[in-house]
Amino acid sequence: MSGQIALAAGTIAYEDTGGNGPAVVLLPGLLMDATLWSDVLRRLGPGVRCVVPTLPLGAHDTPVAHGADLSLAGQARIVAEFLERLELDDVTLVGNDTGGAIAQLVAGDAELRRHVGRIVLVSCEAFDNVPPGLTGKTVVLSGRLPAPLFGLFVQQLRLKPIRRTPIAFGWLTKRGDATVARWLRPVLTQRAIRRDTMRVLRALHTDRDILVDNAARLATFDRPALIVWASEDRVMPPEHGRRLAQLLPNAELVEIDDSYTLIPLDRPTALANAIERFIHATPFQTSTRIASAEQPDVSRRPG
């Protein structure tokens, strides 16, 4: 089911498989929409309810509200409001690429994480890797260009040889170029989306230390955590996956071969299997809210 929800930052589109199973919310990354997770959703099966928002990170179709905070911290607040408004509790929060950075910020904040029961971090920014690698640094620097020059920069991404270079998506996915081309349509065709994207990129330029500062807070997340990393990742160092697994008190690490950063595109079956095993191996709470006879559990009901 496709849906939309009006949040403080603007209207957010999302996909929702529905059902009464455990809620899994999957976050895409920079210049990516919900289809990052399509192949994973098909493999997770009917036993879980999967909800995938398209955050305002450059592949969104509807411009954000005037003055919306599009920094990483602002995106984390968008996710927390999204969970609240859909009445999702005991959520397994999954993030890949920049979505994983946002998931870390949610997990590191006692207020934002109150609806989160476990996290899965999939090859993502961590520690001082903001913006990440050559790819991230190049794209973020493009956001500092004047608007007309930024428009010229992104128009080059129409060409597959440009998309496949290390400064674009070439080091992010081995096999997913057709999906990447679809993600780029909003920023290529809508001036308002290019404006939002420039704001995202400029915020990322100033957010260099945000995950370093968040590390101590992330270490207080004592709920189950799964770290899934591409062993061949050229943008998100595999060492960072190992460090995250050591930092989080209740974490395990899975490394997946034959993939770059975007494991949901390159190795969806292996990733889905890891997530499904993790979900069924870790206990679920009745609700992560304060429950009482006057406040019945309303978690995981269809949106």
Image (cartoon, helix red, strand yellow):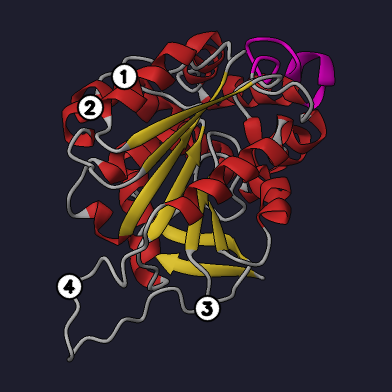
Q: Earlier in the sequence, mark 3 or mark 1?
A: 1
Q: Is residue 75 above or below residue 82?
A: above
| Circle 2: element type | helix
Asked whether disc 2 touches disc 3, contact meaning CB atoms under 8 Å apart, the reply is: no
Residue at the disc numbered 1? 127
Asked whether disc 1 touches disc 2, contact meaning CB atoms under 8 Å apart, the reply is: yes
Q: Dot 3 surroundings within 10 Å: few (below 14), some, or many (20 or more)? A: some
**Residue kind at label 1, given as amino acid type:** Phe
Q: Earlier in the sequence, mark 2 or mark 3?
A: 2
Inspect the magenta stretch and tell me whether residue 170 lies in it: yes
Magenta segment, which residues? 158-171
Residue at the disc numbered 3? 302
Residue at the disc numbered 2? 215
x%, y% of residue 36? Answer: 65, 42
Q: Dot 4 surroundings within 10 Å: few (below 14), some, or many (20 or more)? A: few
Gap in Å between the C-alphas at discs 1 and 4? 32 Å
**Residue kind at label 2, given as amino acid type:** Ala
Q: Is residue 147 above or below residue 264?
A: above
Gap in Å between the C-alphas at discs 4 and 2? 26 Å
